[in-house]
Image: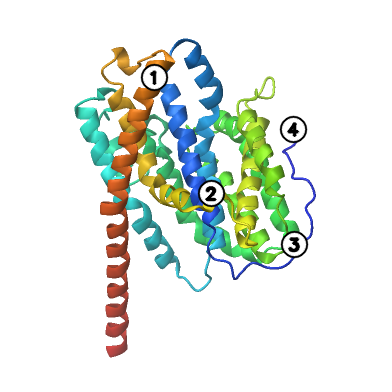
């Protein structure tokens, strides 16, 4: 089994250390959130009959939106890496970024579980507490405890913890070593289900953070290579069709007689090339439609939208037997649009009233604490 390897690239015109803003990647976050939203409409069976079959064909692979989120996260963090930033400062910035909304998401999930969606109720205090502290994904039976969508935050929390220790050797590595890291990451993606099957402990290739780490690492690796100017990504007109092919290949069969999934490795590889291509377009002054103001605003709301969308989808459909409407498309479309509108409205409120002010408050007060410590140290 061989992992997909990107075709040779043209020589890059120079380093991109001076470029900070990559707006197309913010817009891509919203496109990714829409894929996941479509997948969960399928999972809850909003559409029935032939419409349900068609929706399944389109959005069965929508779950790979989380894969794209992981790649994006690694790429963006590596792109914005500042060697002078302390590990403590990096971790605190990540806590300020995700934790306030996570807590709100857990509270909303508990309300939904106690009212409209009892099937997501968490049994026992231990898995709920584990979810609050973003460690429940390490126990496969608890992976959707608390807010079911927040399992991916457990992975992200592990990635953030690991990032300072991964980025330093990567920025010092040669381009040849970085290429080896990227290819190895793809191989590990393909092998993850097999590793989970043979591991002595209980692991899940879908939700165990360690087995999702290669997706984050390949994003980091391509960002480092690109910033140096030693590698030029594919043009967007090539990378985009490859990403669409990668989306389809995520549903490709396993290697016969094994749990090895080369199709998923292709998905990760082609998604990573798309992320790098979009970043390159921004860096070279050729921003895409994803950089337009509306997509930027939606991209900024995408995190909150992701945390609440499944709760809304399940709540809106809770009046049907087992919460599965299975409606003809003429009735399913308005219902889906209603769920979308409600989720977006809640997400916008959370973004404006919780995410932004809480992040500012946490970062501002962290600065006050640091200044007080420096002052105390100076006084002896």
Q: Which residue is mark 4?
A: 1
Q: Label 1: how many residues lie within 10 Å, few (<14), some (14-19) or many (20+)?
A: many
If you read the primary sequence from the N terminus, does the residue marked by circle 4 or circle 1 appear first?
A: 4
Between circles 2 and 4, the one closer to the viewer is 2
* CB under 8 Å between discs 4 and 3: no
* CB under 8 Å between discs 2 and 1: no
Q: Which residue is mark 2?
A: 290
> Could you give the CA–CA distance between mark 1 and mark 3, rounded to whole angstroms?
48 Å
Q: Quadrant of residue 260?
A: top right
Q: Residue at x 31, y 21 (%)?
A: 317
* CB under 8 Å between discs 1 and 3: no
> Where residue 208 sits: x, y (%)?
48, 38
If you read the primary sequence from the N terminus, does the residue marked by circle 1 or circle 3 appear first?
A: 3
- In the structure shown, which secondary structural element does the residue marked by tag 4 occupy? loop
Q: Which residue is mark 1?
A: 332
Between circles 4 and 1, the one closer to the viewer is 1
> Could you give the CA–CA distance between mark 4 and mark 1, rounded to whole angstroms?
42 Å
Q: Which residue is mark 3?
A: 12
> Where residue 308 sits: x, y (%)?
33, 38
> Could you give the CA–CA distance between mark 2 and mark 3, rounded to whole angstroms?
23 Å
Which corner quadrant holds the C terminus? Answer: bottom left
Q: Residue at x 39, y 34 (%)?
A: 143
- Frontmost residue, 296 versus 133: 296
In this view, the residue farthest toward the top is 49
> Could you give the CA–CA distance between mark 4 and mark 3, rounded to whole angstroms?
31 Å
If you read the primary sequence from the N terminus, does the residue marked by circle 2 or circle 3 appear first?
A: 3
> Could you give the CA–CA distance between mark 2 and mark 4, rounded to whole angstroms?
36 Å
| Residue 100 in view, yes or no | yes
Position above or below: 94 against 29: below
């Amino acid at each position: 089994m061989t992992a997909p390897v990107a075709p040779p690239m043209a020589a890059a015109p120079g380093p991109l250390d001076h470029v900070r803003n990559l707006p197309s990647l913010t817009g891509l976050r919203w496109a990714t959130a829409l894929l996941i939203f479509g997948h969960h409409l399928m999972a809850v069976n909003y559409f029935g009959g032939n419409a349900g079959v068609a929706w399944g064909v389109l959005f069965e692979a929508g779950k790979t939106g989380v894969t794209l989120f992981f790649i994006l996260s690694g790429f963006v963090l590596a792109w914005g890496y500042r060697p002078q930033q302390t590990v403590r400062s990096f971790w605190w910035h990540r806590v300020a970024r995700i934790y306030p909304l996570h807590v709100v998401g857990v509270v909303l999930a508990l309300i939904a579980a106690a009212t409209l969606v009892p099937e997501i109720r968490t049994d026992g205090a231990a898995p709920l507490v584990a979810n609050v502290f973003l460690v429940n994904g390490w126990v496969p039976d608890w992976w959707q405890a608390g807010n079911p969508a927040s399992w991916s935050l457990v992975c992200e929390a592990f990635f953030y913890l690991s990032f300072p220790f991964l980025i330093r050797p990567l920025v010092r590595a040669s381009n040849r070593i970085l290429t080896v890291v990227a290819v190895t990451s793809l191989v590990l993606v393909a092998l993850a289900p097999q590793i989970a099957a043979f591991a002595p402990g209980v692991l899940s290739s879908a939700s165990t953070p360690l087995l999702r780490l290669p997706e984050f690492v390949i994003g980091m690796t391509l960002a480092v290579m690109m910033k140096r100017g030693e590698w030029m990504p594919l043009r967007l007109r090539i990378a985009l069709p490859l990403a669409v092919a990668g989306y389809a290949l995520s549903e490709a069969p396993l290697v016969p007689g094994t749990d090895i999934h080369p199709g998923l490795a292709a998905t990760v590889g082609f998604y990573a090339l798309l992320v790098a291509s979009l970043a390159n377009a921004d860096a070279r002054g050729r921003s895409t439609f994803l950089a337009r103001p509306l997509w930027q605003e939606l991209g900024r709301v995408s995190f909150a939208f992701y945390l609440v969308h499944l709760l809304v989808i399940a709540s809106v459909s809770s009046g049907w037997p087992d919460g599965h409407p299975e409606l003809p498309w003429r009735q399913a479309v308005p219902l889906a649009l209603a769920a979308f509108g409600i989720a977006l409205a809640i997400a916008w409120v959370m973004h404006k009233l919780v995410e932004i002010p809480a992040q500012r408050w946490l970062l501002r007060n962290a600065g006050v604490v640091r200044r007080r410590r420096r002052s105390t140290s100076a006084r002896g």
